[in-house]
Image (cartoon, grey):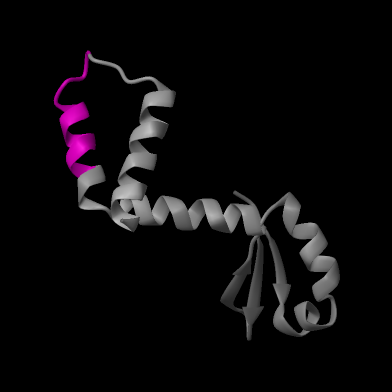
Amino acid sequence: MTMDVVGIDRARTHLADLVQRVSAGPILITRNGEAAAVLVDADDYRALAAWAEIYGNPEFHRQMAAVAARPHDSIADQDLDQEVERIRRARDA
């Protein structure tokens, strides 16, 4: 993935423009030539945060190991989505 790179001083003075541009992809913000932050679209951030939560759940890994043990079985995307939602609800309960 290619991302725009912007120095922190430019980011500070052009924040409104960067917020509009971020829908096209993340923007790396640097300080003294080093990566300091990444500006991402809010929907992309929510999706990443949700994935991180699910991926960090041991139950998710147990179920994925069970699926891997049966390589000739398949699971529909809808079933996987429902299982992810079930894990999320169980965690929130």
Q: Position of residue 51 (x, y in %)?
A: 42, 50
From this view, report whether residue 80 is shown above or below residue 13.
above
At 17% from the left and 35% from the top, the residue drawn is 65
What type of secondary structure mainly makes up the magenta span? helix
Q: Is residue 59 left or right of residue 49?
A: left
Q: Position of residue 13 (x, y in %)?
A: 84, 82
Q: Position of residue 32 (x, y in %)?
A: 63, 86
Q: Residue furthest front?
A: 93
At 76% from the left and 77% from the top, the residue drawn is 11
Q: Foreground residue, 25 or 30?
A: 25
At 23% from the left and 15% from the top, the residue drawn is 73
- Is residue 71 highlighted in magenta? yes
Quarter holding residue 6: bottom right
At 29% from the left and 17% from the top, the residue drawn is 74
From this view, report whether residue 14 is shown above or below residue 27.
below
Q: Foreground residue, 54 or 8?
A: 54
Q: Foreground residue, 41 or 1?
A: 41
Quarter holding residue 22: bottom right
Q: Which residues are magenta?
A: 61-72
Q: Is residue 33 left or right of residue 7?
A: left
Quadrant of the drawing holding the C terminus:
bottom left
Q: Is residue 27 left or right of residue 67?
A: right
